[in-house]
Amino acid sequence: MASWEEGVIDSPDWSVTEHVRRYLATDGRDGYMEGGMTNLVLTVKGRKSGKLYRTGLFYGDYNGTYILVASGSGITETHPNWFRNLVANPEAHVQVRGDKFVVRARVTEGEERERLWNFMAERAPVYRTHYEPRTRRTIPVVVLERV
């Protein structure tokens, strides 16, 4: 897995970078529970550059799969870069606590999206109260499955 760790570019948001670095340095002992929610570290390949980009994200464990919400800042009409990169390159690297593994991502639709949106919004109400009302876009819900 060293190839997923070499030359990685961290989030341009200093608070996210700081969170990810704490998480990685402690195998998630510091940072796994952040913002009242479970967190993972996601590394994706850039859709244009081919470079590796890393960010920390809230996630939910739903029957052994990892669920992400592509809310981004919630006030823009564009999806976050990590999401757009995953759509273009669905294979990614994840770290949950000290566990590092490769996943394949897929974007949910229809009933599955609604079910998983509700699952995540129950765990992090901010998705409904802060993000959803501030955008006209449908916020994507992503399933990550271990490869």
Image (spheres, rainbow, N blue to C red):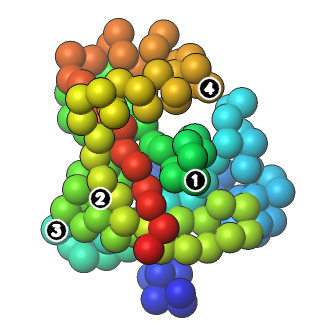
Nearer the observer: mark 1 or 4; the answer is: 1
**SS at badge 2:** helix
Within 10 Å of the Cα at label 2, are there few (<14), some (14-19), or many (20+) other Cα atoms?
A: many
On the image, numbered disc 2 is attached to which residue?
Answer: 86
- Per the model, the C-alpha gap separating discs 3 and 2 is 12 Å
Query: Which badge, 3 or 4, comes first in the chain's sequence?
Result: 3
On the image, numbered disc 4 is attached to which residue?
Answer: 123
Query: Which badge, 3 or 2, comes first in the chain's sequence?
Result: 3
Nearer the observer: mark 2 or 1; the answer is: 1
Residue plotted at (27% across, 17% down): 135
Judge whether 72 appears above or below 5 on screen.
Answer: above
Query: Which badge, 1 or 4, comes first in the chain's sequence?
Result: 1
- Per the model, the C-alpha gap separating discs 1 and 4 is 16 Å
Residue plotted at (21% across, 73% down): 49
Q: Estimate the x, y position of residue 111 in percent, counting from the top left.
A: 30, 27
The foreground one among 86 and 55 is 86
**SS at badge 1:** loop
The numbered dot on residue 64 is 1
On the image, numbered disc 3 is attached to which residue?
Answer: 48
**SS at badge 4:** helix
Q: Estimate the x, y position of residue 68 in percent, counting from the top left.
A: 45, 43
- Per the model, the C-alpha gap separating discs 3 and 4 is 33 Å
Q: Estimate the x, y position of residue 32 in percent, counting from the top left.
A: 73, 50
Query: Which badge, 1 or 3, comes first in the chain's sequence?
Result: 3
The amino acid beneath tag 4 is Arg
Within 10 Å of the Cα at label 4, are there few (<14), some (14-19), or many (20+) other Cα atoms?
A: some
Nearer the observer: mark 3 or 2; the answer is: 2
